[in-house]
């Protein structure tokens, strides 16, 4: 149960004054659905203004606060012309307060002739006159403009204004209770951090480094603690020790000998599975490093030990792909592999369910459907989860309840994760790395070119397709929602390419219904379509050996890790493959370095570390990529610096301070619920 002290923070935003259905919409869009979310909606930056007595003291482009006497109002018959109010400072200098459109009504009300007002805004020049366009604040004498010298700037969505959000934040903070201290005393004293509530208030007032760090640390501590609780709980669970005799694995007929990294990972997995405590291991493999083979070996260990294994994939199309390749590889061993997805109906489904129940099916591959209540197993003892980051810790726990005893879990991801973030996302897992590519994988030639060479590129593409090969064309956005006109939307690019190539082109993006997406992907996978235009939905797992060209448009808008993932979609067959990074005109230094690195190396682990270095804490891959870190408050810099400390602190709490018992333990319980990492608490109660 959530501690009562947190109830005011978890009230809906509708309970705040002035929040009706109309305001709720833009708030929901920002993910601000509860009072807690608004309290944690920290400013993106602050505007710092200087109070001046006369305009001559202000620099052009500077944010100022100045006391003015209001003079003549000037309007024009042309509705598009600006509405100007002339005003004078104490020294008699004239400045124009300029308004456009409907804002002139505000000017008429706020600026009566002959009165004095404090005005805050940006001082600019127009011709030979100084002006302030749409002043940020106009306040009567004795008002609070002097407090506006440092003002927060919040992320908004349509229908919200800065003052509106600031007002809601004020209400949310007023409701925030004093919470017990969960940070270890010496750690807090050493860092000189304020108490939780004070930190929250300070972080909204100014660029208060210590307050921001304290709030980030809380989030990192909650995460570390929850993962440790899950891990400790897992150690206590009784699993099924599985020891294979090699009878199935010995019959495998693999096209390539195993790499050293594969052999090492299989040995680590085998060691884990022989223990009674269920395995919780993450297999990190670079694109094309042969994770599927390792997974198959692990599942065959279970089969040799007389148990069943399951592979869980995030999407229908990936499940089918895994099924095909596992069935093909496992054929000589005699292990029976089946597919089960949400789409299977009728007799076929019944037969699969029976096979799982009576044990005639050894390995099942599927989507979440394989864990529905109606699906029963004779003895499920091993689960492989593909594309780990799509499944949260909560779902990993749900799996544990499926077998007679907790199954061994092997999670796989093709996203190389920097060491720092591995701790953040997978603190409860042991990690195996596949850091060498199997023989026979060809290097992919990476070319960087400007948008002006588009026509030549399309001709090159036509030649590839004429030779019977396939290609991907990836765009950064679905519609041109926010930003310059030159952002190539997938839909516009698709229309242009369709004009040239007709039915040979299909499109996939995240906003399409699932069925339509799968149909398009299947046409491409079968080779009926030669070109797939897509947003980044294809970055995970699609395997089309005949695809030899990957075009990534506006490549500068993607992070290194994402570019690397996308590039890995080609080069899967015997033909030479190419990746073309198309960029816009103005490239930032970071973008240039990113594209250069892509040309230089195909080592995903190296790219992941470089990505972290290039991004620093401020710019998270241009846009904040989901799934990138499990954190909303901690920046990358803070994660790098504070996560190891938070991890140690969590371990101290577990080992020395009695876990969630005792005074600090009670406070830590509040912390877990505050950050909704309470699955950590639930494991303690065995559910």
Image (cartoon, rainbow, N blue to C red):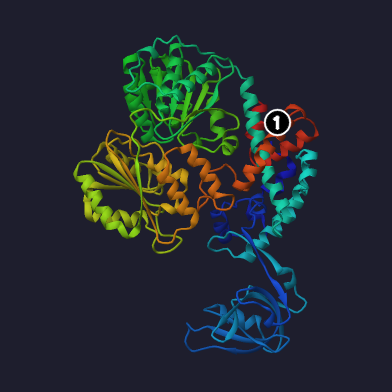
- Mark 1 — residue? 651
Question: Quadrant of residue 421 in the image?
Answer: top right
Residue at the (71%, 45%) spot, across then down: 7
- Compare residues 499 and 36 and report the one nearer the observer: 499
The spot of residue 73 in percent (x, y) is 60, 88
**Number of residues whose C-alpha sits closer than 10 Å to that of mark 1, classed few (under 14), some (14–19) or many (20 or more):** some
Side of 623 relative to 653 (left or right): left
Image quadrant for the C terminus?
top right
* Marker count (numbered): 1
Residue 462 % position (x, y): 22, 49
Q: Residue 53, relative to residue 627: is it above or below?
A: below
Res. 627 in view: no
- In the rendered view, tell whether residue 318 sits above or below residue 409: below
Q: Which image quarter is the N terminus in?
A: top right
Give the quadrant of residue 592. Answer: bottom left
Q: Element type at marker 1?
A: helix
In the image: residue 138, left or right of residue 265:
right
Rendering coords of residue 137 (x, y %): 66, 74
Coordinates of residue 476 in the picture (x, y in percent): 41, 52
Instruction: Name the residue at 71% across, 69% down.
Output: 149
Residue 628 vertical placement versus 258 (above, below): below
Position of 306 compared to 446: left or right?
right
């Amino acid at each position: 149960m959530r501690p009562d002290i947190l109830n005011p923070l978890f009230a809906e935003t509708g309970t705040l004054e002035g929040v009706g259905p109309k305001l709720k919409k833009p708030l929901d869009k920002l993910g601000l659905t509860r009072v807690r979310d608004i309290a944690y909606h920290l400013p993106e930056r602050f505007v710092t203004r200087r109070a001046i007595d006369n305009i001559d003291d202000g620099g052009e482009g500077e944010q100022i606060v100045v006391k003015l006497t209001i003079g003549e109002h000037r309007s024009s018959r042309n509705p598009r012309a600006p509405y100007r109010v002339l005003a004078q400072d104490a020294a008699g200098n004239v400045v124009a307060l300029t308004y456009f459109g409907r804002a002139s009504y505000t000017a008429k009300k706020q600026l009566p002739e002959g009165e004095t007002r404090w005005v805050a805004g940006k001082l600019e020049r127009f011709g030979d006159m100084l002006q302030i366009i749409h002043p940020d604040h106009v306040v009567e004498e004795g008002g609070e403009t002097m407090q506006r010298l440092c003002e927060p700037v919040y992320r908004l969505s349509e229908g919200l204004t800065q003052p509106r959000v600031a007002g809601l934040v004020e209400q949310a903070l007023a409701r925030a209770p004093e919470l017990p201290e969960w940070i270890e005393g010496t750690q807090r004293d050493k860092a000189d951090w304020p108490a939780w509530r004070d930190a929250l208030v300070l972080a909204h007032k100014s660029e208060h480094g210590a307050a921001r760090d304290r709030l980030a640390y809380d989030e990192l501590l909650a995460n570390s603690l929850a993962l440790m609780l899950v891990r400790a709980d897992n150690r206590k669970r009784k699993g099924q020790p599985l020891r294979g005799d090699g009878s199935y694995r010995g019959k495998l007929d693999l096209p390539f000998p195993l790499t050293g990294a594969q052999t090492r990972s299989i040995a680590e997995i085998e060691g884990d599975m022989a223990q009674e405590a269920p395995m919780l291991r993450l297999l990190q493999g670079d694109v094309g490093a042969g994770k599927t083979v390792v997974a198959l070996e692990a599942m065959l260990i279970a089969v040799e030990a007389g148990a069943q294994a399951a592979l869980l994939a995030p999407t229908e199309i990936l499940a089918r792909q895994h099924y095909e390749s596992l069935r093909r590889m496992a054929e000589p061993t005699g292990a029976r592999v089946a597919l089960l997805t949400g789409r299977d109906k009728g007799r076929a489904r019944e037969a699969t369910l029976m096979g799982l129940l009576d044990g005639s099916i050894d390995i099942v591959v599927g989507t979440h459907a394989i864990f529905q209540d109606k699906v029963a197993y004779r003895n499920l003892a091993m689960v492989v989860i593909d594309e780990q980051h799509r499944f949260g810790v909560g779902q990993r726990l749900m799996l544990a309840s499926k077998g007679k005893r907790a199954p061994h879990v092997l999670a796989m991801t093709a996203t190389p994760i920097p060491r720092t973030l591995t701790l953040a996302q997978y603190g409860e897992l042991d990690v195996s790395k596949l850091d060498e590519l199997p023989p026979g994988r060809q290097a992919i030639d990476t070319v960087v070119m400007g948008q002006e060479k588009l026509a030549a590129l399309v001709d090159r593409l036509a030649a590839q397709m004429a030779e019977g090969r396939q290609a991907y064309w990836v765009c950064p956005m679905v519609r041109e929602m926010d930003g310059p006109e030159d952002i190539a939307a997938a839909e516009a690019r698709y229309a242009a390419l369709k004009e040239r190539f007709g039915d040979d082109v299909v499109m996939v993006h995240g906003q399409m219904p699932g069925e339509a997406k799968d149909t398009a992907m299947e046409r491409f996978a079968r080779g009926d379509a030669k070109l797939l235009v897509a947003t980044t939905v294809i970055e995970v797992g699609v395997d089309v050996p005949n695809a030899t060209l990957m075009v990534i448009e506006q490549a500068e808008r993607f992070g290194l890790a994402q570019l690397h993932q996308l590039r890995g979609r080609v080069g899967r067959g015997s033909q030479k493959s190419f990746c073309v990074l198309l960029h816009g005109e103005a490239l930032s230094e970071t973008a240039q370095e990113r594209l250069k690195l892509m040309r230089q190396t195909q080592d995903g682990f190296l790219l992941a570390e470089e990505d972290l270095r290039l991004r620093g804490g401020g710019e998270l891959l241009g846009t904040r990529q989901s799934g990138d870190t499990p954190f909303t408050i901690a920046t990358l810099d803070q994660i790098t610096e504070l996560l190891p400390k938070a991890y140690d602190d969590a371990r101290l709490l577990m080992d020395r301070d009695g876990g969630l018992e005792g005074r600090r333990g009670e406070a830590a319980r509040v912390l877990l619920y505050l950050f909704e990492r309470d699955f950590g608490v639930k494991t303690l109660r065995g559910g």
